Image (tube, coloured by chain):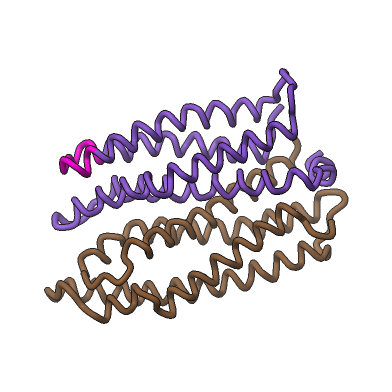
Chain colours: A purple, B brown
Amino acid sequence: MTGLLAAIRPDSWNFPLFIHVLGAMLLVGAATTAVVTSLATVGASERDRMRRFTFRSLLLVGLPAYIVMRIGAEWMYSKEFGDTDDDPAWIAIGYITADIGAVLLLIALVTAGIASWKSKSGLGKAAGLITAIALIGWIVAVWAMGAKPD
Amino acid sequence: MELNDWILALHLLAAFALVGAEVIFSIQIASLWGTESTARVTSFVTLSRVATAMVIAGTLGTIVFGVWLAISIDGYEVWDGWIIAAIVLWAIASELGRRAGDEYASAATRAGELAAAGTESSPEVAAAFGASRGFWLHVATSVVVLVILVIMIWKPGA
């Protein structure tokens, strides 16, 4: 089934798929960076700097990567499914994790921004936890994109 | 779901771990660019360890599950041109990445030693976290990984 699907994928789907996958990979990298740096213990002199680093990772890499991933996803969806109403489960998983992930990413971004601005350690850790929840969802989405459950 | 679907999912997850780690290293390199601060460098030790674990899992996972897929999926063979190209590039990326990792690990260890000895800033650290040999090896690794991704999606000749 997998081989059949890969073999019959039209060439015109490749670029949108590339955009989607590349955006998602950048997003996973940026989110993992934010989770680790906001939850890891660092020396007192570096805490403020690491909070800024977490915020900037989400703002300058995570958010643009999410937008690129989502544009690629919609482009790919329009080519593969068009106006079909009956989406398979893996598409539903992708949309749910992307939509909830977007909300969590924005909350984490605002929280990390305030933590960085006001030097709030607790808020910084909260941003890391929120990003971690989003990241778990996106990892489930990666599994679904590969395994393609019906 | 069939076994091949699971193998593809694991191959994809491994690819995300590998590229995700490259992204982490890139963000880290950009953030530490030209820094002389030994404390700044040592504060990234945990992130480096996580990224290194992701690289190892991703490197092994992509090749094991990728070759498994090539064998088990009808219509693909391990000796297909695009698969051989991807395997060769995977080997090149692995070696380039290993060398880049060694360069940055040595620099981070040195920064840790200097920080422990009470040295707050060092031009030696700044040189290692600028346009160093490690940096160019990292750039080369990232380019090769990107080419592998292009090959995996376009499958030229398949």
Quarter of the image holding residue B140?
bottom right
- Position of A145 with respect to A114 (left or right) is right
Residue A120 is one of the magenta-drawn residues: yes
Quarter of the image holding residue B82?
bottom right
x 65%, y 49%: residue: A18
- Position of B91 with respect to B38 (left or right) is right
| Quarter in which the N terminus of chain B is drawn | top right
Residue A148 is one of the magenta-drawn residues: no
| Quarter in which the C terminus of chain B is drawn | bottom right
x 49%, y 75%: residue: B137
B158 vs A98: above or below: below
B49 vs A34: above or below: below
Q: Which residue, as the protein is rendered here, is positioned at the far right?
A: B75
A38 vs A126: above or below: below
- Provide residue B100's location: percent of width, then percent of height: 46, 73
Give the main secondary structure, helix, strand or loop, of the magenta stretch.
Answer: helix
- Provide residue A16's location: percent of width, then percent of height: 67, 44
Which residues are the magenta region? A114-124
- Position of A45 with respect to B22 (left or right) is left
Q: Which residue, as the protein is rendered here, is positioned at the far left?
A: B118
x 33%, y 61%: residue: B31
- Position of A137 with respect to A86 (left or right) is left
x 22%, y 75%: residue: B113
